[in-house]
Amino acid sequence: MDRLEASILLEKRTTLIKDFLAGEKINFLEALTCILDEYFYTVFEKSISARKMVVSGKPFAIIALGGYGRKEQCIHSDIDLLILFDQSVPPEVEAFVQELLYPLWDARFEVGYAVRNIEECIAMSFERFDILTTVLDARFICGASLVYSSFMENFRSRLSGKQLKKTLTYLYEHGEKRLEDFGDSTYLVAPDLKSGFGGLRDYHTLLWYAKIKSNIKSRRDLEYYGFLSHFEYASLEDSLAYIWDIRNRLHNITGRKCDTLHFEYQTEMASLLGYKGKARQPNVELFLGELHAKMEFLKQLNQITFEDILSNCKIKKESTLSKPAKTEGLVLRNRRLTFANTVIILQKPDLLLKIFLESGQTKTPLSIEAMRVVSEFRHLVDDQVITDPRCVKMFKRILALSYWKFNVLNVMLTTGILERFIPEFSALVNKIQYNHYHLFPVDKHSIRCVQVINSFKEPGTTLMNTLYAGVFKEIRSKNVLLMAALLHDIGKSDPAKEHSKRGVKIAGPILDRLGFNPTEKQDVLFLIQHHLLLAKTATRRDIFDEETAVSTANTVGKIRLLRMLFLLTVADSKATGPKAWNDWTENLIKDLFLKTMGIIRTGELASKKTQRLIDKKKMEVLALLREGWREEEANTQLDSMSRRYLLYVPALNIVAHINLYRNLGDKNFIWQITKESASDIRTVSICGKDKPGFYSKIAGIFFLNQIDIVASQAYSLGDSHILDIFKVKPPKDLIFEKEKWKKMENDLIQALDDDHFLDNALGKIPGTLSISSGKKPEANQVRIDNETSSFFTIIEVLTYDFPGLLFSVTNALYRNGLNVNVAMVGGKIDQVIDIFYVKDINDDQKIKSEEKLEHIKTSILNSLPHICAKEVLNEKN
């Protein structure tokens, strides 16, 4: 019988979803809730076990919780139920649960339930925040209504008493943690529609707050009880309808509960919603632009809710009277800035900027009504306003007042004022960068970059933050740095062109209009053109090669430019996302900055300072090598080592490597495997005779034995020996790790003796690589740099990561008669960039023949898998 009811439910649900996807005008969420309610009514009415419990004096209520309780059921949302008894829970309830829920589970509905009595449920509500909020959303479905009403009266009584302040504190702290865990979805390229800031949970927070404070019964009461104005409520309904539409379509596309709008679904979603793109702005950007705007509104509501929670823990009646603000024409109402009236804006259009200046200075947010007014009157910010020196000065001050936690510049963007003041910025609005490297659209990324720069005003708690604060303090024209941060990606308006150079052309007229003098203008343009210089050089070149720092110093030339470029680089990387910024990247950029600073400041060649550091390092090593080594022998060994090795490697590690070399004897190689402290990484230090293809064969052995390479460095030890250091993940079976390393050692012995030992491993390299990124994937690239280094040919390989990548590339280099002297394995971001400093095996020189360079490039490309777009397989309902 109950399975029949479940099949009827499935049939109704399928029809309802079909109608929704066909575009029929229905209240889909409420309709889906209703057919679930009908199922529970029917099963309850026909249940013998339910009847027995009622007859025996154990009446109970079936209560909907969470989204189901709010009548906001989405296609694959969980169905949360509470089976509630007045006092004791009878054993017969188990049979009823089987009747009620087993058919739903068999039909693959996600159903969560709890069986409680009233006292248990109330006690747990005030112990756990997740239970408290589900109870706030509780809705009676069927059964004993008196049990439900008794429960809710009891709950409300305790909530409005001693539990009130604790509950409001829970609500606030949960919101803070949610921002930390999920981030600001109004900034993200792949937003979380539910839990991120700007997601549905912001609306839920407002609803819970209103239920706690005023015991409202429905969303409509938010306007009736004064939590929202009529305009705000209408905007809320519009935003919710839009986001729920997307969420349901996303559930349908993925065939499961999925609330993150990942890259691979965005283009399809834009098409389903009927967006028509243009040449310079594809439909997906138009779609995400509107989505971000709706989510921005929900975020603003959430921020207002948070302010109310903080100031109304005692539930004081809030005054609705307006108080004058510092700026004439502005008033404070409910702790938010707004305009005294709209007529005054027509008389003084500069108020459209002044409201943001006062907001930043006093940390007072604009009311939602004020933001609407700004948006409607933004046309008044015309050429006369944006060239007015007083308004320009105000704008520069606003730039310096934009912080992550109080984001006045982002509100300017949301209301359209930023685009009016800098019309060229409009081409960046909602501009999506389709890779896993950039988390934010270009406009939000640029604003985030400004915010990071402003954060350097405070030294913070770490040594690196102290360094940034110290450098920031030395910068005289901070407006130059902030404007460069805002405009550094302005050239991305045209993705077909190199954005740094194009950015210089676009930014020039902007800077003239904003009154920057010739020196300031040139500085901003230099920073825009070279904003990637330090990051690319630090991560793609050997910074321990003195030529690298000298070349950077020659490009930058002036200390003031280097300081600003350094902070802009840090801010740009931090604003891009965690995959562009980590401890490794941070230290590389810092080291390059300090080395370049030393060269510019003293005019001293890198080699002189380098030699002093090397001499100091040698003394440290000699002091550690006293036992068992003659000083002459130790000096000979140190003199045979490359300068970059002596600079880069700590003294203790050098001692370990020297001892490794001493124990080599007649063997082709010897290795040492150490475990990194507080890390699941193994460091493999391999000392061996410099045989052709040595580095490639090590990489091949790791690939053959399914060992993932995290990073590597290659060094020469004199003319006849080498030292390769790999950081790798351990074997999967840690119990037999020792045996696995022994097997790999034997494999390497064979590979060095037999040049064809690894031929079978090459056959395991994939021929095709399917990439899912939301757009057509980038093709493999090989770039050859014969200018940067006087001694090496530098080869950059840009591709997507796959097992055996390092082996595949280095084997191609080996087969082309090249020796890998320095290897820099790039981090796994969206694409991998591996850098190799190579020389010809025969004459130990860089490769000069254009024909051979072209042949090398072709060989490497042929060794890589063909890249194609991955088809998204949609599991439809």
Image (cartoon, helix red, strand yellow):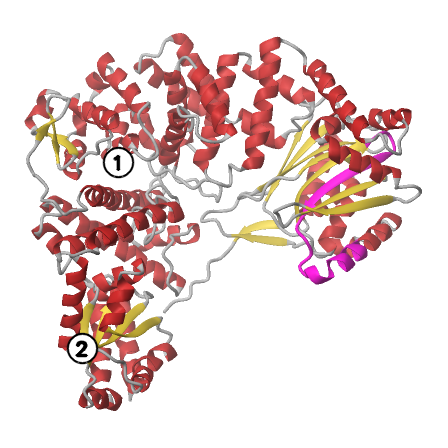
Any mark on residue 147, and which? none
Q: Is residue 9 magenta?
A: no
- 751 over 146 or under it: above or below: above
Place residue 118 in its image quadrant. Answer: bottom left
Query: Is residue 166 visible in the rendered structure shown here?
Result: yes
Q: Secondary structure at mark 2?
A: strand
Q: Is residue 839 left or right of residue 419?
A: right
Q: Is residue 664 left or right of residue 152?
A: right
- Residue at coordinates 71% horizontally, 20% vertically from top-left? 613
Which quarter of the figure is the C terminus placed in? bottom left
Binning the other alpha carbons within 10 Å of mark 2 as few (below 14), some (14 to 19) or many (20 upward) gives: some
Where is residue 712? Give x, y as percent.
69, 40
Q: Is residue 736 magenta?
A: yes
Q: Which residue is mark 1?
A: 414
- Residue at coordinates 7% horizontally, 52% vertically from top-left? 224
Q: Earlier in the sequence, mark 2 or mark 1?
A: 2
- 32 over 759 or under it: above or below: below
What range is drawn magenta here? 717-744
Amino acid type, callout 1: Thr
Q: 159 or 543: which is nearer to us? A: 159
Q: CA distance from mark 2 to mark 1?
A: 45 Å
Q: Is residue 241 left or right of residue 401?
A: left
Where is residue 827? Give x, y as percent.
59, 41
Furthest-right residue in this view: 666
Where is residue 709? Give x, y as percent.
67, 47
Q: Which residue is mark 2?
A: 142
Q: 503 or 199: which is nearer to us? A: 199
Which quarter of the figure is the N terminus placed in? bottom left
- Residue at coordinates 31% horizontally, 48% vertically from top-left? 173
Q: Nearer the viewer, mark 2 or mark 1?
A: 2
